[in-house]
Amino acid sequence: MATLVQKFGGTSVGDAAKIKRAAERVKRAKDEGHEVVTVVSAMGKSTDALVDLAYQLSDDPDKREMDMLMSTGEQVTISLMVMALKEMGIDAVSLTGWQAGIRTEGIHQNARITNIETENLERHLSDGKVVIVAGFQGMTPEGEITTLGRGGSDTTAVALAAALNAESCTIFTDVTGVYTSDPRVVPKARQLKSISYDEMLELANLGAGVLHPRAVEFAKNYSIPLIVRSSMVDQEGTVVEEEASMEQNLVVRGLAFESAVTKVTVEGMTSKVDTLSTLFTSLAESGINVDIIIQQVTEDQRVNVSFSVHTQALKDTLKVLEANRDALNYTKVRYVDQLAKVSIVGSGMISNPGVAADMFKVIAEQRVPVEMVSTSEIKVSAVIEEKNMVKVVEALHTFFELDERVGVKA
Ligand code: ADP
Ligand code: ASP
Ligand code: MG
């Protein structure tokens, strides 16, 4: 009997009626004769509400206690989902992340799953039960509750699919699939039939919130077909798989964007072999995630380094730089906030030179200055002012021929 793993996101279980609707989907899979494991998120925006409560009490809430708090959201949904299923005559059982055997590292609020002890899950499945698992949470070997980072229920689902050798993993959400860009921001975005793991991983890492990046990583590593589809309408979704069909041979498959980027520049450091290592080690040791890095050595052998961080990390970044003032021996620290990163992604770029040049041409035509750039084999990112983000994304979307055309189905 094939095992299917499904996941319903927050909007899809936002109220009792939606939970019932999701339960009908679960029932359908069970009635088709599958063993079913269903992962659910916290209802609606309830995780945001918990975070909000915490910040009403503390500017810097304890990370362990945040995990204790945030993991409660999913526990509400699992029990309600089982109640709905039982009303439909389906035998089901709810399990928290730790009851489902999800073991993680000890990094609170951003823990990685290390392994899944599947005995408990398998016992319930062989008893014929549908198992409803709380997403986004796990437990360390020491018995501490952890969470997997915002949006992490996707990762719970794919990791379970890998551990149970499931046939596929379906992510039910509030859009009909993966689009060429966020359809809420770019109305001309087009739904994709399929996308490769690598392209999806880049898009997810570059800000496309539709899938948690680690979920895509798991799916790729264990070759699990990942299907993204709507929980509201019965419509074919998007398959994330090894080789995506080359729709219209496009060079760029999708566009992602991210706001709240800040560029920090450290000026006039003495040029020594370990300057960069001292700077970035001190930031890393404080848990600051640095993205794009640009180094410039001046004629008088001084080093200027610019790097981008999430705006939320700015305060900590400035503190670390101040604490290391003597070791780094800089003359000045400057920063520019209210920036955004816009990225184009596509495997077709590997064999097509000039894609970055095209991107810069389009941005220049919009009269928008570029602050920073970074590239990989299958993506180009440009940092620009946040206020120009949507206009640039739309122009790029049109230029790279991604716009939905009336009457043409991708
Ligand atoms: P869930 O609660 O189901 O996990 P999310 O809000 O995390 O849902 O993810 C779905 C949202 O992702 C969509 O509502 C959409 O606004 C956003 N999104 C961003 N980029 C894309 C994209 N390329 N394709 C589809 N949706 C996207
Ligand atoms: N409830 C968590 C969040 O809102 C996890 C998830 O929905 O995937 O981030
Ligand atoms: Mg999500």
Image (cartoon, rainbow, N blue to C red):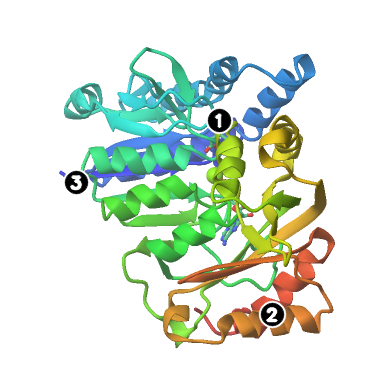
Q: Nearer the viewer, mark 3 or mark 2?
A: 2
| Marks 3/1: CA–CA distance | 27 Å
Q: Quadrant of residue 188?
A: bottom right
Asked whether mark 1 and ligand 2 are closer than 8 Å, the reply comes as: yes
- Label 1: how many Cα within 10 Å (few below 14, some 14–19, many 20+): many
Residue bearing mark 2? 360
The quadrant of the picture showing ligand 2 is top right
Element on which disc 1 rests: loop
Q: Residue at x 40, y 36 (%)?
A: 156
Mark positioned earlier in the residue sequence (3 or 2): 3
* Residue 261 visible within the image: no
Q: Nearer the viewer, mark 3 or mark 1?
A: 1
- 124 above or below 383? above
Q: Is residue 161 left or right of residue 128?
A: right
Q: Residue at x 71, y 21 (%)?
A: 60
Q: Is residue 213 left or right of residue 305?
A: left
Q: Of the residues shown, which amino acid type is indicated by label 1? A: Ala
Between 183 and 53, the residue placed more toward the observer is 53
**Image position, residue 133 (x, y; %):** 39, 29
Q: Residue at x 69, y 67 (%)?
A: 186
Q: Is residue 351 left or right of residue 92?
A: right
Between 265 and 394, the residue placed more toward the observer is 265
